[in-house]
Image: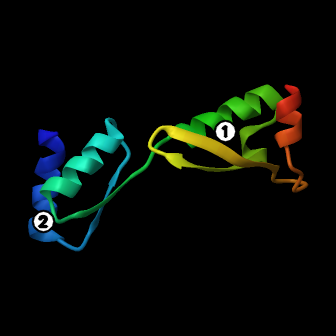
Amino acid sequence: MPVVFDFVREMEQRCPRALFINFSNPESRIILALGLHSTIRSVGLCHGIFLARGQVTSILDLPEERIDVWGAGLNHFQCLMQICDREIGADLYPLLKEGK
């Protein structure tokens, strides 16, 4: 937390209207601390959707660039809402459910 707040204190001085984007752990704790102890706006991002996309491509045996995923969730609890084939626009969720 001290390293994060070194950056945040600089931001408060130099760019107080900037948005702090956190992509590190503990993701939710950092954002909570900033909300309690700083005026800097902040948002936390979780890489779980990208990991899930990689797992889906492995299960379906398709190249990663061919698959689009849309997810929703909170912190590290996310769910893939849509899995689509970029080339043909097909819904791939049924194939994933079959385990193919």
Q: Earlier in the sequence, mark 1 or mark 2?
A: 2
Residue farthest to the bottom?
17
**Residue 61 visible, this orientation:** no
Secondary structure under the numbered disc 1 in the rendered image: helix
Image location (x, y in percent) of residue 82: 74, 50
Secondary structure under the numbered disc 2 in the rendered image: helix
The N terminus, quarter of image: top left
Q: Is residue 94 left or right of residue 12?
A: right
**Cα separation between marks 1 and 2:** 36 Å
Question: What type is the residue that disc 1 sits on?
Answer: Arg
For disc 1, the marked residue is: 53
Q: Is residue 1 left or right of residue 22?
A: left
Q: Quadrant of residue 16?
A: bottom left
Looking at the image, what colour scheme do you see?
Answer: rainbow
**Residue 4 visible, this orientation:** yes
Image location (x, y in percent) of residue 51: 59, 34
Q: Is residue 14 left or right of residue 45?
A: left
Q: Which disc is residue 12 wearing?
A: 2
State the residue in front, 80 or 21. Answer: 80
Question: What type is the residue that disc 2 sits on?
Answer: Glu
Q: Is residue 100 left or right of residue 41?
A: right
State the residue in front, 50 or 41. Answer: 41
State the residue in front, 22 or 28. Answer: 28
Which residue shows up at 88% across the image and 39% down it? 94
The C terminus, quarter of image: top right
Which residue shows up at 44% across the image and 43% down it? 75
Q: Quadrant of residue 80?
A: top right
